[in-house]
Each structure stands twice: as C-alpha cells, then as structure tokens.
Image: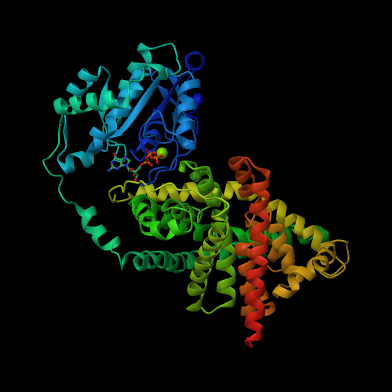
Amino acid sequence: MEADLAVLNAPQRASARTSLRTAAVVGPPNTGKSTFFNRLTGASARVANWPGMTVDVLTARVLMGGTMLRLADLPGIYSLEGHSEDEMLVEGFLATVPLHAIVAVVNATRIELQLPLVLALKATGLPLLVVLNMIDEAAQLGVVIDTARLATELGVPVVPVSAKFGHGMETAKRSLAALLDAHPAPAVADFGAVPARDARERESMRLCAHAVRMPLALPAGATARIDRVMLHPWLGIPLFLLAMFAIFQAVYGIGVPLQDAMKWLLDGLKSNMLAPLLAQAPPLARSFVLDGLVDGVGTVVTFVPLMAVFFAAMALVEDSGYLSRAAWLMDALMARLGLDGRAFVMQLMGFGCNVPALLATRVLRNRAARLLSMLVIPFSLCSARLQVFLFLTTAIFSPTAAPFVLFALYLLSFAAALLTALVWRRRYTSREPLLMELPPYRLPTLSMVAAEAWRATSHFLRRASGFIVAGVLLIWVLTRLPPGSAPAGPETLAGWAASAFAPIFEPLGIDPLMSIALVFGFVAKEIVLGGLAVVLSAGTDRLAGALAARLDWVSATSFMIFALVYTPCLSAIATLREEAKSLRFTALAVAWPLLLAWLASFVFYQGARALGF
Ligand SMILES: Nc1nc2c(ncn2[C@@H]2O[C@H](COP(=O)(O)OP(=O)(O)OP(=O)(O)O)[C@@H](O)[C@H]2O)c(=O)[nH]1
Ligand SMILES: [Mg+2]
C-alpha cells in the first residue's frame, strides 16, 4: 500500500526518506475520513456509511512534492475524552506518536456539531488542517460556509472537499504540503490545554454565526421519505428480511453461471494440459498434483466469482446507509437479549468474515456488552462457510429449493446467536443505551462497490490461499498413506482418525470421512470444501455428484448445521483472544459453539429420522 519510491532518482529518494513526515486523519465517525485517506494515498481502507467502520490505525505513504508523508487513518471519535476502545486508541495515538500535522475531516452539513472537536484538536498544539468534507451534500441542502472567514477566525487552513467525488482534493493536498513545510518538527498532542466542553461549544456557536449560513429548515429530503417505509413499525423487519433474501437470490442468479464458467475453464485446464503433462510422472506424484492440489484448490477457486458478487451486494447494503437502519430496527429485540442494535449489525458484518466483525466491537464502550457480542459474532455465517453451503445446497437440493435452504441456514445462524445471548446475558450484563445517529442514505458509486468487492475477495484469497493449499495437501497425505491403500480407505491415516471420531459424529449422521473435513475446518472453513474433494477423490466436476451419491438431504443438512455452528476458525479464535485478553473467555467461545453444534445436529438428524425422512 506504500507509494513507490522507485519512481524517484537516487538523490530524490534519499531526501524523501530523510524528510519523512507523519500526519493523521482525525474526526467524528462517518465523516469520510477513510474516503479522504484513500483518495490522497491511493490506499484501500474500508469505507461504509456506518459510524464506526474504521477501528484500527491504517497507514499509507504518499509523496507530496519532495517529501514523503506517512498518513494514518484513525477511527472516528466524538471527543478527546471518549471511553470506548476505539476512542481510547485515537487518544493514545495522538498522545504518544509524534506528528507533523493532523487533518481534521468534518461533515460540512453538520459543522455546528463537529466544530467543538476541531477546537479541541487545535488546542492540542499540533499543526492542523481542517477539511470540510461532503461539500456536495452541503450544497444540496443549502448549507453555505464561508471557508475563508472560518479559516481566519479559527487561525488554521480550511478546505472544502468532496472526497467521494474527488472535488477539492488538489487544494487539500497543497494546503497539507504547505502545512508540513511550515512545521518541520514533529510533536505529540498536549491534552492539558484543551478548553472545557462548554467553552468549546460557545466558541463553535460564535464561529458558525459568523461563517455558516444554514437554511431555516433543512429540506425534508429523500432520506426521510425512504425511511417512512424502511423504518415502518410493521413493514421494517419484513422488508429487511426481503432485502437479505434478494441478496441470496442475486448471489445464485448471477454467481452460479459465473461459477459454472470457471469450473469449465479449470476442467479444461486439468484434462487438456496438466494431465497429459504429468502422464509420465510416478502415480503417487500424479495423484498428489491432480487429486490433491488441483482438485482441492480448484474447487475453492470456482467460488471466487460467487464471492465477488456477494461482497458487491454487501457493499451496496453497507454504503447506502441501510446498515444503520438495520441496527435501529433490531435494537428493541436486541435490548431484550442484553445487546444493542449495533451488535446485530456486527453480526451482519460477520457475513463477510468474522474477524473484522469481532474488531468492530471496539466501538462498544461497555466490556460486558463487548464480550457478549464477541461470543455471538462467530455464529455469523461467514463467506467461507457460505462457500461450503452453496456447494452442498446446489449439489443436494433442487434449484428452487436451494436458495430457501441457504436462507434457512442464515436464520439458524441468527437463532444460534440469539440463544447464546439469552443463555449468557446474565453472566455478561450491561446497560448501555444505544445512541446512534442514522446517516442519510447515500447512493453508492459503481467504482466504490467494485473496489470493495475486489478488496474483500482478494483479502479472502490472500488470507485463505496458504491455509487451503496446506490443508488440502495434508488431507491428501492422510487419505493416501500408507502407500498402496485404497484412497480414503479404512487403513489410511484418515480412515484411522475417522474411526476415532466416529462415536462423536455417528449420532449426527455425519459420515466418518466427511468428519475429517470438519476437523480441518477448525483451522479455516475454507479447507472444508477442498478437503471434501480430496477425501472423495473427486474433481471440481465430479464432487457434486459424489456428494449427492453419498448423502441424502437429511445427513447433508445435519453436516451443514454442524459446520455452521461448531466453531469459529483459528483466525477468529486468535482475534477473540487478542481482543478479550482472557483465556477463560476464549475457551468458552470455543467450547460453547462445539456443544451447541453437536446438540443442534443431533436434534435435527434424530428428529428427521424419527419422522421417517
Ligand atoms: N456525499 C458524499 N459522501 C461521502 C463523501 N465522503 C465520504 N462519503 C460517504 O460517507 C460514508 C462514510 O465514509 P467513510 O470514509 O467510511 O467515513 P469515516 O469517517 O472513515 O468513518 P468511520 O471510520 O466510521 O469513522 C460513506 O458512505 C462514503 O461513501 C463526500 O464527499 N460526499
Ligand atoms: Mg473510516
């Protein structure tokens, strides 16, 4: 993500290195800090119309004239006296990291509420540039800001910008460069000089009276009209479920044909190029490459287009501002479970990957609420599990039934989360009322949705590729050794391990060999599918058939229920441990889902069989 120094000649490079400057982007939540940061540096920080998207420090380098600037994107803060984990992170950052400048990004349409923070930042003594972002929305609403006057009265440079559309970025860049030139020595923030809140609010009102003209009444815009339907007391939740269901339909409708094309491509590659190429190789080596590496990894690769479609759909939900509505709609229900609406949204974020969702709990101020949220998030059906379920549902169920089964699995994932909250809310009680502003609806741009789909998919691949290759190869070794034994037969290492696990999985109707894939799924769910392909010695083209021949819908569903609930992957567990800083809590977060998964599969499988299915 760092700008390339290679474009410079040697002396320039040396001077850019020696004059490395550091600055940070600071401001209230959801003002477009990450959008601004991405525009300036070309980085790809995650952007969403949701206060609290950024929870960690992300840095990138950018060349500004002759100086190399290291810019940090920070989480949003309401004040410098905040107590949530992400706010304390920002305060700690400003108090300890020497900076040459800070860039305060505020939402121009809410300037009167956000100036007090700017005044506090100015009082810390750090050189300051004020960016009035979302100037496009301000113009639409009729908010007029005299930036020159504001700059004079504040005594710091002020630039109007629309980071989303790229307006004013050149001026912002020049102002920042000038600020850096004027202040060559870095410093840390001095919080001692920050005036009291009342004094800042009075000063902010005075400044606004001089430099800002607000319309008498803000026009009742599209947001209010849309919300009359979306937040309707009766329609709100059904509409939300409908929207989610539409996403899954789209994932199947657009993603599956793309996936078929990918399968066809990989198959051709395997049978027309790789197989002839390896015709002379020893059988064990040929099997290792073709049945292990190519089948295992190939099965996973065919899902890449599908996942890109899914991530694009989620980016639409996140960037439109609907996510905050989901929190609002679910708040009453979540409050009964000892959580708040934001926990529900983190659950939705977990659809992509549980790890960022776990990190997103940093915006919760109360530790008990945070722990309870971290306990429920791993039930969120992440994209790695989605991959397994997409495959199994299409292999076992009819094309009309498959989306419903998948939707039911999402409902089950919420049910497991709700049950967990109900059971554990007394142990982790908290009372923190939800105070969240609903941002206006914003039309996501195509480039942003595409960028997010790309970011998430490539992140998934980078994260997963090592796991997948190592996992499927290990499974290949276990199912093919000792040499000479029938693939995945009882005398192989895997067969031996499977019989050891049999007493646990037999009552669930899960075939011992399939349980091997589950055991590996403990490391990363991405391995499950590749693992199945290797265990059943079936390529991308034949795996669906092999599974359908082996499983009826009851045992397939039991397998999926277990895979959904059983345990977060190793990365999620590591994140949990890191964030909760408690070994006991981490142990609970592993043991509880295991127990729940076994019970859920047991009840389903035995129940269905008892009913004669
Ligand atoms: N209309 C408009 N929308 C913008 C502009 N800049 C950012 N946005 C949108 O505002 C929302 C928030 O953007 P982010 O960059 O994630 O905001 P942030 O300040 O980093 O948010 P946190 O990390 O949650 O504090 C997104 O939906 C952006 O697309 C702008 O100049 N105009
Ligand atoms: Mg951000």
Q: Nearer the viewer, residue 481 or 214?
A: 214
Color theme of the render: rainbow
Left or right of 311? Residue 385 is right
Figure disc tally: 0
Residue 250 sits in which quadrant?
A: bottom left
Q: Quick check: 371 above or below 546?
A: above
> Left or right: 597 with respect to 261?
right
- The quadrant of the image that shows the C terminus is bottom right
- Position of residue 578 relative to residue 387, above or below, is above
Task: Name which residue lies at 17% across and 43% down.
Answer: 141
Residue 367 coordinates in the image, percent (x, y): 53, 43
Residue closest to the far left: 216
Q: Nearer the viewer, residue 479 or 98?
A: 98
Q: Position of residue 597 (x, y in %)?
A: 64, 65
Residue at screen point 51% across, 71% down: 408
**Picture layout, residue 161 above or below residue 8:** below
- Residue 176 image position (x, y, % from top left): 34, 21
**Left or right of 56, for residue 435:** left
Residue 158 at x, y = what percent?
Answer: 26, 24
**Residue 94 visible in the shown view:** yes
Between residues 89 and 43, which one lies in front from this camera angle?
A: 89
Within the displayed image, which quadrant is ligand 1 positioned in? top left
Residue 559 in sight in this render: no
Residue drawn at (16%, 37%) of the image: 143
